[in-house]
């Protein structure tokens, strides 16, 4: 399906409004064609004869003589001047109404595309987002999506309006003087050739600009989001130089496109001037020969502007369409991406679960040919706590991510209460799972909304109770606006420990039967860590839990410990049993720590 057909799909539902806007646009075009005629009548019928009284007709427009009542000269001039004002007034009203409607329709369709694009990005798996810069995706939603409005407002509607104007203008000009009309159209093939020559170049350069601007946004976002790290290592000048390099690339790309537009504009305007000059010469000859009146020549000149203006507009429209097409392609490239974590055709919804989880010969790799997890076999009974240990890159976080189906195993399966989790809808599966991460993610909103993120329908009392159980109510009560206090971007107004308590409160409020904990205390100081772990122990009670932690003492007494090494299970059992075996876990336990 072509880009333009796909764009038009977003305008379904706006057909009645588009038709009304087109009718108003056509009315404006008709009124515009009438504008030169009052002045022609003044020049041809009133000024030359200087008659005291006269009667004039409108044969050139309607094809038959329509006589007006006998008027004196000043009355006629006043009437014709008033006609100019009335025509301009109605033209303005029709143009205003049609432009407003076209812009509104374009913005509504832009909203539709942006929403669909953002929703699709939300649905795509983490594997997609892992390989793509978030700033690039943001750029496509915020900026590339505007191409759909450009294609409609500066493309389709402009083409239709310019086409109707050309037809109307050509018909009137042909009736006035067919020789001048054909002469005026002689440059059209040259205009079309110029459009063809520059169109491909403009599309390529527009795509380059969008890619450069996307890279610039990425550089800006990364530099500002990591501002503490930049200051800590004194890398301000380096970040500025990196930004300047990206900005310079964007500048060069914009300059190249600007020069192309200037060159094409000069070529088009030169051709139009040549056509106009030729028409002036031949028109003057016709007036001198008496085959054309001065008033008719003046009207013809006005229509020549009307003829060349839409031709020039169509030229720039073609180039604007080329640039917009590049942005539309980038949007549809995202929409064409299929989610690689999909529910099976017979996927069911679940209301509750016992929490029995099993990995059966499960393997996983982010890229084909490179496994992160290999042949994992684990069984976790309901309400059982499983601790995961292992060195950096062992695959602990990846294994945890398979449970809520952030990724699907490449081979094997994971079951919940004996059912393959791919046969459960992702939405209801994730409703059964609460997650607390190493770095709690908070949104730039209030404390209350962050706690209730997993259960937006929770009551105020439920939110406060969750905060109390997470030992967060004390510090929240000391904030200026308590639960309505803004936490800042990514929770920047709160300490690490406070953010972690809000994350735990969020898990308490969700009250899911399965709990996943990924290094929930690794970023905390020992004192805060000890307090938070007491809260986490309360959170784990009565839930099927998988916990990754660097504190061996914390998990030594849990129901089951699994040691991962290079993506494989090398040891499995209770803490004391594993110590007695004298293997990997025993060495970790003896040292009291391990690399994470």
Image: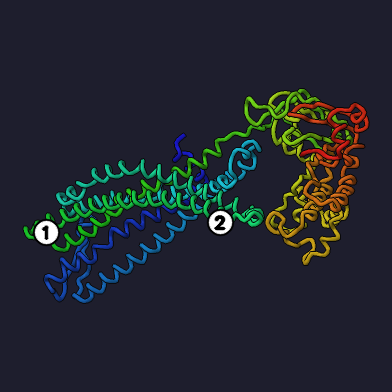
Among the two numbered marks 2 and 1 on one chain, the one whose residue lies closer to the N terminus:
2
Q: Residue 464: x percent and y percent?
A: 85, 56
> Which residue lies at the image location 80% right of the left edge and 25% below the top edge?
377
- Seen at 77% across and 57% down, the residue is 495
Image x and y of residue 460, in percent: 82, 57
Look at the image and tell me whether residue 15 can be seen: no
**Quadrant of the image occupied by residue 548:** top right
Asked if residue 53 is positioned above or below residue 178 in the image, the reply reads below
Pick the front one: 224 or 363: 224
Image spot of residue 331 (x, y percent): 52, 42
> Position of 521 compared to 243: left or right?
right
- Local SS, label 1: helix
| Distance of label 2 from label 1 (alpha carbons) | 67 Å
Q: Position of residue 98 (x, y in %)?
A: 42, 57
Q: Nearer the viewer, mark 2 or mark 1?
A: 2
Q: Nearer the viewer, residue 230 or 201?
A: 230
Kindly state the secondary structure of the residue where label 2 is placed: helix
Circle 2 residue: 237
């Amino acid at each position: 399906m072509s880009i333009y057909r796909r764009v038009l799909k977003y305008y379904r539902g706006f057909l009645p409004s588009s038709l009304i806007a087109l009718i108003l646009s056509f009315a404006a075009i008709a009124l515009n064609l009438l504008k030169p005629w009052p002045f022609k009548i003044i020049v041809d019928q009133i000024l030359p004869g200087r008659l005291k009284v006269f009667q004039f007709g409108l044969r050139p427009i309607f094809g038959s003589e329509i006589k007006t009542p006998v008027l004196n000269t000043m009355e006629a001039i006043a009437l014709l001047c008033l006609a100019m004002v009335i025509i301009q007034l109605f033209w303005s009203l029709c143009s205003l109404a049609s432009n407003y409607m076209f812009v509104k329709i374009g913005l509504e369709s832009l909203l539709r595309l942006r929403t669909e694009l953002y929703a699709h990005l939300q649905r795509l798996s983490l594997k997609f987002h892992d390989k793509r810069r978030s700033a690039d995706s943001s750029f496509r939603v915020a900026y590339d999506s505007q191409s759909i409005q450009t294609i409609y407002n500066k493309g389709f509607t402009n083409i239709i309006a310019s086409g109707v104007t050309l037809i109307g203008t050509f018909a009137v000009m042909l009736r006035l003087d067919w020789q001048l009309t054909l002469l005026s159209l002689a440059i059209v093939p040259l205009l079309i050739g110029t459009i063809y020559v520059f169109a491909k170049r403009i599309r390529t350069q527009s795509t380059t600009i969008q890619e450069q601007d996307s890279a610039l946004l990425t550089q800006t976002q990364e530099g500002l989001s990591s501002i503490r790290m930049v200051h800590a290592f004194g890398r301000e000048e380096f970040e500025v130089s990196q930004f300047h390099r990206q900005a310079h690339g964007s500048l060069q790309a914009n300059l190249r496109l600007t020069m192309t537009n200037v060159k094409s504009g000069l070529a088009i305007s030169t051709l139009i001037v040549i056509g106009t000059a030729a028409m002036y010469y031949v028109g003057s000859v016709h007036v001198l020969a008496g085959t054309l009146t001065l008033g008719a020549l003046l009207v013809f000149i006005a229509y020549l502007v009307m003829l060349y203006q839409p031709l020039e507009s169509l030229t720039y429209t073609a180039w604007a369409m080329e640039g917009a097409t590049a942005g539309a392609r980038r949007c549809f490239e995202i929409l064409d991406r299929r989610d690689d974590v999909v529910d099976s055709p017979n996927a069911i919804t679940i209301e509750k679960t016992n929490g029995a989880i099993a990995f059966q010969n499960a393997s996983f790799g982010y890229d084909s040919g490179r496994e992160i997890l290999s042949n994992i076999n684990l069984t976790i009974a309901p309400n059982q706590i499983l601790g995961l240990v292992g060195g950096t890159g062992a695959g602990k976080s990846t294994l945890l991510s398979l449970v809520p189906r952030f990724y699907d195993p490449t081979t094997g399966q994971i079951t919940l209460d004996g059912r393959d989790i791919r046969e459960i809808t992702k939405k209801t599966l994730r409703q059964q799972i609460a997650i607390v991460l190493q770095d709690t993610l908070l949104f730039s909103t209030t404390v209350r909304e962050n706690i209730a993120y997993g259960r937006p329908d929770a009551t105020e009392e439920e939110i406060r109770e969750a905060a109390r159980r997470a030992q967060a109510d004390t510090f929240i009560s000391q904030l200026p606006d308590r639960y309505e206090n803004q936490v800042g971007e990514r929770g920047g107004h709160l300490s690490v420990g406070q953010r972690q308590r809000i994350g735990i409160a969020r898990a308490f409020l969700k009250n899911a039967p399965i709990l996943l904990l990924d290094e929930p205390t690794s970023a905390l100081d020992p004192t805060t860590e000890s307090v938070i772990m007491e809260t986490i122990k309360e959170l784990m009670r009565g839930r099927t839990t998988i916990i990754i932690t660097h504190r061996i003492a914390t998990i030594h007494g849990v129901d089951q410990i699994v040691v991962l090494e290079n993506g494989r299970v090398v040891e499995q059992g209770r803490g004391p049993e594993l110590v007695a075996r004298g293997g990997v876990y025993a060495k970790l336990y003896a040292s009291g720590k391990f690399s994470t």
